[in-house]
Structure formats: C-alpha cells, structure tokens
Image (tube, rainbow, N blue to C red):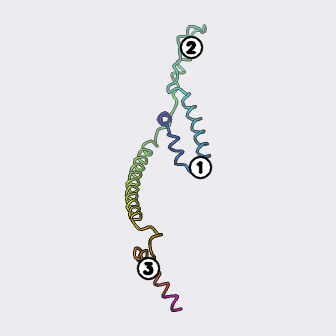
Amino acid sequence: MAARRIGQYVPDWVKIASRVPAEGRADMARFRSIYDNLKSGLDSVPAKAETIDWAFYQKNISKPGMVESFRKAYEAITVPYPKDTQTAKIDVVEKEMAQECEKLMRESRMRIKEYQAEMEKIKSQKSFEDMTVDEYLEMHPELKKQADEEIKKHIWN
C-alpha cells in the first residue's frame, strides 16, 4: 500500500527550513501543517481492518440463520482495487532523478574546487590598496587592451 510506504518517511523539517528562503517560510509552514494533519489521519487508521467476531453475534442474536447469512454475504464481497500501474514508472523516474542528482553533485564539487582555487589565487594577490593600476592591468591583460582602445579612441576623436 503506497500510503503506508509514504507514511514511513519522516521529513527533517529543520534541514528543510534551513534551505527555504525567508519569503517562502509561510508557505512551508502551511505545507508542514497540511502534512502533519494528513499524517495523523493516516496514522489513526489501522493497517489492517479488525476482524468481525462472528461468534459474539451468533451468541447474542436470537434469529436463526441471520448471522450466518450476513457472514456469507460479507465474505462474498470483494472490493475491486485499481491495479497499480504507476509504481514501476515512479521507480524508473526515481532512479533517473537519483542519477541526475549524483551528476549534479559531482559537477558542483568540481565547481567548488575551481572556485576555491580561484579564491586562493585572489587571496595570494596584493591587496587593491597596495596595488598600482599598472600592476592590476598586468594581471588582467583583457582590461589593459580595453583601456588602451578607449584611450586611442578618445585621443583621436
């Protein structure tokens, strides 16, 4: 039963709240309230229906054959449950999403390493207060080229 499987998941609300931006906190609180209400409703329903104590009714109902006819009618009832056609599809999508997440995490780790290397490079440089314009332009040749072009443009005009 899918509801029972879903009911076993316990979200880490603190971890989720730490990732939600301030403007989304009200929506998250509303979602959590709805989730808690649904979860408590699901938890109040037993996983398996209680069995009927036919002996109790047989003993306490005096009309002969009445309990037996109800019992036969009850046992003859079959509740048609829809076939589960979505779980296999959901499992496939879940596996694809897990692979995509792994890929994104690997790419993110690589970018983090690149950014950390760039940060180390920036930290190892002279501070801007101690650096001259010429030193800065030597470190950024594309800006030096752009500045030279701007100077030429303004001098000749």
Q: Quadrant of residue 113?
A: bottom left
Q: x, y (%) of residue 63?
A: 60, 9
Q: Nearer the viewer, mark 3 or mark 2?
A: 3
Reply above or below: 32 against 155: above
Which residue is nearer to you in this view: 58 or 48? 48
Within 10 angstroms of label 3, few (less than 14), some, or many (20 or more) residues?
A: some
Task: Name the one closer to the observer, 101 or 136.
Answer: 136
Q: Secondary structure at mark 3?
A: helix
Labelled disc at residue 24: 1
Judge from the rendering whether residue 64 lies leftward or rightward of residue 121; answer left or right: right
Report helix, strand or loop for mark 2.
helix
Q: Which residues are magenta?
A: 152-157
The residue that label 2 is drawn on is 67
**Disc 1 residue type (three-letter):** Gly
Q: CA distance from mark 1 to mark 2?
A: 58 Å
Dividing the image into 4 quarters, which one contains the C terminus?
bottom right
Nearer-N-terminus badge (3/2): 2
- Gap in Å between the C-alphas at discs 1 and 3? 45 Å
Q: Nearer the viewer, residue 126 or 37?
A: 126
Would you say the residues marked 1 and 3 are in contact, meaning their CB atoms lie under 8 Å apart? no
Name above or below for residue 53 compared with residue 142. above
> SS of the residue at dot 1?
helix
> Which x, y percent locates residue 35?
57, 38
**Amino acid tagged 3:** Lys
- Please tell me which of labels 1 and 2 falls first in the chain: 1
Instruction: Give me the C-alpha separation between circle 3 and circle 2.
Output: 98 Å
Give the residue furthest to the front.
Answer: 130
Q: Which residue is tagged 3?
A: 144
Q: Residue furthest bottom?
A: 156
